[in-house]
Amino acid sequence: MSESAKTIEKLQEVVAQCLAENERLGEENRQLIAVNQQLKADLKTANQKIQFLLSRLFGKKSEKLDTNQLLLSLNMDEFLANGEDDEPAKTVPAQQPYR
């Protein structure tokens, strides 16, 4: 066998090995893409759950403002500013809280 025939044979073996490795890496890549997509979906679900729980914990409905308590504080400030006069402190009608 000539030198060029041996070189061609070795190159063909290398090409066959490269093709097999390429096929193996392609399959591994497809599997990793599938795992990545699943992990992204899981992360999205987890983030949605976190946002839901945060909104329940810290959202608008977690702390309700009682206007009567604010009015009590305002009336107390007026009472203390006026001293203990015979004149009662002015009262402000309660307002409905915003919903």
Image (spheres, grey):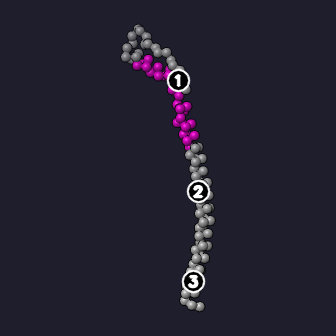
Report if the CB atoms under discs 2 and 1 are less than 8 Å apart.
no
Q: Is residue 89 above or below residue 67?
A: above
Q: Which mark is residue 36?
A: 2
Q: Is residue 78 above or below residue 5?
A: above
Residue in the foreground of this view, choosing between 4 and 58: 4
Dot 2 or dot 1: first in sequence order is 2
Q: Position of residue 58 (x, y in %)?
A: 52, 36
- Where does residue 98 sit, x and y in percent of width and height? 53, 25
The label number, if any, that marks residue 8 in the structure image: 3
Instruction: Specify few, some or many for label 2: CA neighbours under 10 Å numbering under 14, 14-19, or 20 or more.
Output: few
Please tell me whether the stretch drawn in magenta is mainly helix, strand or loop. helix
Q: Residue at x 54, y 39 (%)?
A: 54
Residue drawn at x 59%, y 80% as measured from the top left: 12
Distance (Cα) linking label 1 and label 3: 87 Å
Callout 2–callout 3 Cβ contact below 8 Å: no
Q: Which amino acid type is shown beneath numbered disc 1?
A: Pro
Q: Is residue 70 magenta?
A: yes
- Mark 3 neighbour density, 10 Å: few (under 14) some (14–19) many (20 or more): few
List x then y, in percent, for residue 35.
61, 58
In-front residue for pair 37/55: 37
Q: Is residue 24 left or right of residue 88?
A: right
User: Residue type at mark 3?
Assistant: Ile
Residue on which disc 1 sits = 97
Alpha carbon of mark 2 to alpha carbon of mark 3: how far? 41 Å
Provide the residue span drawn in magenta: 50-77
Quarter of the figure with the N terminus: bottom right
Task: Check the image and report above or below for 76 versus 29.
Answer: above
User: Distance of mark 2 from mark 1, alpha carbons?
Assistant: 47 Å
Disc 2 marks a residue whose amino acid type is Asn
